[in-house]
Amino acid sequence: MLGPPGAGKGTQAERLHEDFGLPHIATGDILRAEVSNGTELGSEAKRYMDDGELVPDSVIIEMITQRVNADDARDGFLLDGFPRNEQQANALRDALDALERRLNAALLIAVPDEELVRRLAGRRVCVKNPTHIYHVEFDPPKHEDVCDQDGARLIQRDDDREETIRRRLRVYHSQTEPLIAYYDDAGLLRRFDGCRSPDEVHDHIRATVATLKLEEEL
Ligand SMILES: [Zn+2]
């Protein structure tokens, strides 16, 4: 899954997981799980995190490799959150080559920056219960900044502030966006219009994955 932060990659991956039974490998999630389970790789990753350093690509790729080798990933998998740059893409390709596995497609959910800012910066979260989520434009509470369900105050999380979103988008454009050309050159890119409703995006991606699956079985 490829696309900017806020494009809905995780949501779409979950739905594809339901459609096709493909495990959704969200690298952020498996990293957190390995750390909290105290596995060998998790402990190694934690040492970097405790020192305030980025977890090296080799550690993340080792986690992905293990996950891809699990029984439920035999017929395929959805990778979400990795690779984020060309160097990681090359390392991933080499690791999959060694397993005699490969990527069949790079599913790009394309959304313009202004739309992402509108979506993310409008989010408001209840201070009492973070599952109470609103949007000032698309799903406003009855009373401004007050939770409909428990009357608690609604806040904007730091992650949803416009300057934070724009910073993440700059990183995406400079580091991850080159992967669009990278996977296009490899003949793997499939592009989806992320401005459409999540249901429409899902329908389009599902049809594409179904076709890829058929081609694979021929
Ligand atoms: Zn609430």
Image: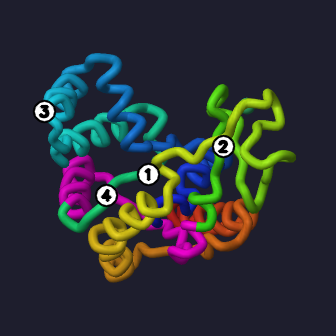
Q: Which badge, 1 or 3, comes first in the chain's sequence?
A: 3
Question: Residue placed at 79% from the left, 31% from the top?
Answer: 151
- On residue 80, the disc is 1
For the residues labelled 4 and 1, the Cα–Cα distance comes to 8 Å
In this figure, which residue is indicated by the disc labeled 3? 51
Mark-to-mark CA distance, 2 and 3: 38 Å
Depth order, front residue of 211/191: 191
Mark 1–mark 2 Cα distance, whole angstroms, equals 15 Å
- The answer to which quarter of the image holds residue 36 is top left
Q: Nearer the viewer, residue 27 or 95?
A: 27
Label 2: few (<14), some (14–19) or many (≥20) C-alpha neighbours in 10 Å? few
Residues drawn in magenta: 88-117
Residue 191 visible somewhere in the drawing: no
Q: Which residue is mark 2?
A: 18
Mark 1 neighbour class, 10 Å CA radius: few under 14, some 14 to 19, many 20 or more: some
Q: In this orientation, which residue lies closer to the viewer: 155 or 18? A: 155
Question: Which label sits on residue 83?
Answer: 4
Q: Is residue 163 left or right of residue 150?
A: left
- Inter-mark Cα distance, 1 to 3: 26 Å
Measured as percent of width and height from the top left, residue 137 is found at 75, 62
Q: Are marks 3 and 4 in contact (CB under 8 Å)?
A: no
Mark 3 residue type: Asp
Instruction: From the image, state whether disc 4 or disc 2 is nearer to you.
Output: 4
Element class at badge 2: helix
Q: Are marks 4 and 2 in contact (CB under 8 Å)?
A: no
Q: Nearer the viewer, mark 1 or mark 2?
A: 1
